[in-house]
Image (cartoon, rainbow, N blue to C red):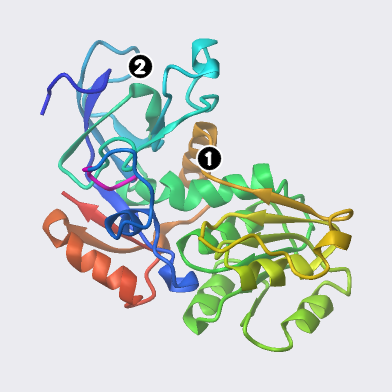
Amino acid sequence: MLGQQLQPGLHQLPPALFGSEAAGSGGGHADPSLLHGLAPSRVPVITPGHEAAGEIDGLGSPTPGWHVGDRVVLAAGKACGTCRACVAGGGLDDCLDQRVMAFDYDGAWAEYVVVPVAALCRVPEDMPLEEAAVLADAVSTPYAAVVESGRVRPAESVGVWGLGGVGTHLVQAARLVGAAPIIALDPLPAARERALELGADHALDPTAEDVPDRIAELTEDAGLDVAFDIVARSGTMTQAHAALGHRGRLVLVGVSPDPLDLGPEAAYAVSRHTTIGHLGYRKSHLQELVRLVSLGRLDVSRSVSAVLPLEDIAEGIRRLESKEGNPVRIVIKP
């Protein structure tokens, strides 16, 4: 295991975490999608698992500030080292061709995984590692969508289409920054109920005929300031775009094969709306989330739907894809 692999360290990472957005969108999350050949990978054989936390088991070389036994959560990426930004001295967040764990190099569905020290974020002793693992992508991606791509400000109205793992956490992030009202949309009643419990002001079924009228009513006919589409299907993109008010922003967080279709009035609306694509997060976002959870500003305890041993990965995937129990994330603990 210690091998001549990536530098500079070997890290033991129980638990490795994986999950699915199937609770709301009907689509799978990245790791199960990889298994079904629906997500791209640069290598033919790879170990999935891109959301992980655990303890350092060994270091490839002496590393100031880090010691064996330190509790960490991983930013699921590493710099390529060869692009223009990397050559100029940029770090992980500046890389133009960032490698993603579980897609470009082996992930954490294993007893051990090798990662660059630059990916590590320290986890306080009082934070469960299962909750720390949830932060890596499942919370950090929607958090970054809210604070960076969407630039949501206090009292701005927000709509969230798709209330699986990412959408659920986006509702919490929007609440954290003071968005009001927050309107959550999902066809699954259990997902809508969960969104209300976690901070949404209203929850609607997007398949209902009166949804446009309800959004107009709830925003006092002003329309949404920001709409987040986690589903990213042609129907949700059109509906979310149509719900925007003057100078509204549509943030596309989900990924799907559907073409970008903003509806018949898109040509007119382009002069008063902004459409933004969003992917991933910065390491600084992950560090901020660790601080927010440790200080009690953000509660992700309900996001750990189950903890299963490594040998039960197939059972975890089955639960996610069948939506059994409406799971947010399932943790695999080697």
Q: Please, what is the three-letter code of the amino acid marked with disc 1?
A: Tyr
Residue 139 in picture, x, y percent from top left: 49, 51
Q: Is residue 48 magenta?
A: yes
Residue 263 in picture, x, y percent from top left: 75, 69
Q: Which residues are magenta?
A: 45-50
Question: Which sits earlier in the primary sequence, circle 2 or circle 1?
Answer: 2
Residue 200 visible at all:
no
- Check the image and report above or below for 228 versus 323: above
* Image point (27%, 41%), residue name: 107
For the N terminus, the quadrant is top left
Label 1 sits on a secondary structure element that is loop
Residue 266 falls in which quadrant of the image?
Answer: bottom right
Classed neighbour count for the residue bearing mark 1: other residues with Cα under 10 Å, few (<14), some (14–19), many (≥20): many
Label 2 sits on a secondary structure element that is loop
Magenta stretch, overall SS? loop
* Image point (49%, 16%), residue name: 86
State the CA–CA distance, disc 2 to disc 1. Answer: 24 Å
Residue 178 falls in which quadrant of the image?
Answer: bottom right
Reading the image, the residue beneath label 2 is 65
Residue 111 falls in which quadrant of the image?
Answer: top left
* Image point (23%, 39%), residue name: 13
